[in-house]
Amino acid sequence: MNDINRYRELASKWLNGSITEVEKEEFLAWYKAHVDEQITIPSSFAKDETELKQRILSNVKASMQQSYTPKTGKIRSLTRKVRAIAASIITLAVLGVGYYYLSERKGEGVHIALEDVNPGKNKAILSLDDGSVIDLQEGGQGLIVGKELYYMDGTALESVLFTNGESESSLVTLSTPRGGEYQLKLPDGTRVWLNAASSIRFPRKFNQNKREVELLAGEAFFDVAANSVDGKKVPFFVKNREQLVEVLGTQFNINTYDKKLGVVTTVAEGSVAVESNNESYRHDRMVLAVGMQTIVNESGITKYEVDPEQFLAWKEGYFYFNDANIYTVLQSFERWYDIDVNYEVVRSDDLFYGKLPKNVTLDKALNILKTAGVHFELKNGRQLIIKNK
């Protein structure tokens, strides 16, 4: 092990309370890289493990009154610090300290750090008309629907689940949880990307006159395949409670997350026609080309010219914020990181702009808030508290 004397020095400084925040970060990084290695106890630390554990415990109790340094932007639980220090010095002795430390604080949950909250991944649930449910969490990137079901890596699902009197037109529902997204290839070759906390219902086989799916919740991007029978194009429709979309082209996005705003439909390629399901506006029909968007709500249909990139970035693995308020930003983080956000702030006029990869941990995602001086804390595992400045 390289530079062992340096890290023994840092451990000693942490025990006597003279270590800086930068040195703490250096020490923890070293520990993570050498967690499985055996380390002997220098006599300068303690006579034995019992004495060393007592020294560590005393140091931790003293530091319980100290707050973290905002400059680092990181919040670590004291328990996690104990584990890092003790394990790096005396290997398994940390288990005794951790147990003793937690038993001294009965009733408090074990906190995890912001950097330990991982981004979402490919996972979904498939629900059949006969009540069967298939967990697709381990099924790679997506699902191909046909006479049988296959993962996109070519692995077949158990076809026995589809033989209980089901017809090929039986409806199937694919749902993603918070912290999940999934891809779907429909029987006609149409591809669908489902964002987090979304759900879509579709038949196992389309009929020859009409193709229709229902977006039950959330957000989905569609790349619709051309389909003809006897030389006649078979139309494709996407319906939900608020609107009906007829596909005249190929690629578009539908977002239903914000109930107050309404249903947002954005065209990336080709064209679509949008109709409101509101009786007062049922005869309103708007055709959208590339770069056009409609918002359908109780006030009717409104059309806009937009840059599609902002509204399609999620599919490419990015958050894209353009003058978004803190609530919009954190609603996206809630869905993707499967967290709950509580606000101590009454209101915020801060607006955020930026393109952020979705594959980063929560602490890195929250950097966009730090630039505006937003303070936050993670409690009870997955409760993010937004604090007053």
Image (cartoon, rainbow, N blue to C red):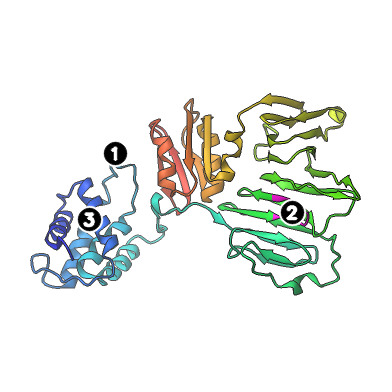
Up/down of 389 relative to 67, above or below: above
> What residue span does the magenta drawing correspond to?
185-191
Rendered image quadrant of residue 93: bottom left
Instruction: Indicate the amino acid at tag 3.
Output: Phe
Q: Residue at horizontal 76%, vertical 38%?
A: 249
Residue furthest toward the front? Answer: 231
Residue 23: percent from the left, percent from the top?
20, 49
Question: What residue sits right under mark 2 in the picture?
Answer: 189
Q: Answer whether labels 3 and 1 touch (C-beta < 8 Å).
A: no
Q: Secondary structure at mark 3?
A: helix
Is 187 contained in the magenta span? Answer: yes
Figure quadrant of the C terminus = top left
Viewer-side label of 2, 3 = 2
Question: What residue sits right under mark 1 in the picture?
Answer: 71
Residue 270 visible? The answer is yes
Up/down of 372 relative to 36, above or below: above
Residue 236: percent from the left, percent from the top?
81, 45
Q: Secondary structure at mark 1?
A: helix
Pick whichever, 23 or 56, lies toward us.
23
Q: Mark 3 or mark 1: which comes first in sequence?
A: 3
Q: Mark 2 or mark 1: which comes first in sequence?
A: 1
23 horizontally vs 313: left or right? left
Instruction: Indicate the amino acid at tag 2.
Output: Gly
Tell me the CA gap for discs 2 and 3. Answer: 53 Å
Q: Mark 2 or mark 3: which comes first in sequence?
A: 3
350 horizontally vs 147: left or right? left
Q: Residue at horizontal 82%, vertical 58%?
A: 205
Residue 153: percent from the left, percent from the top?
61, 64
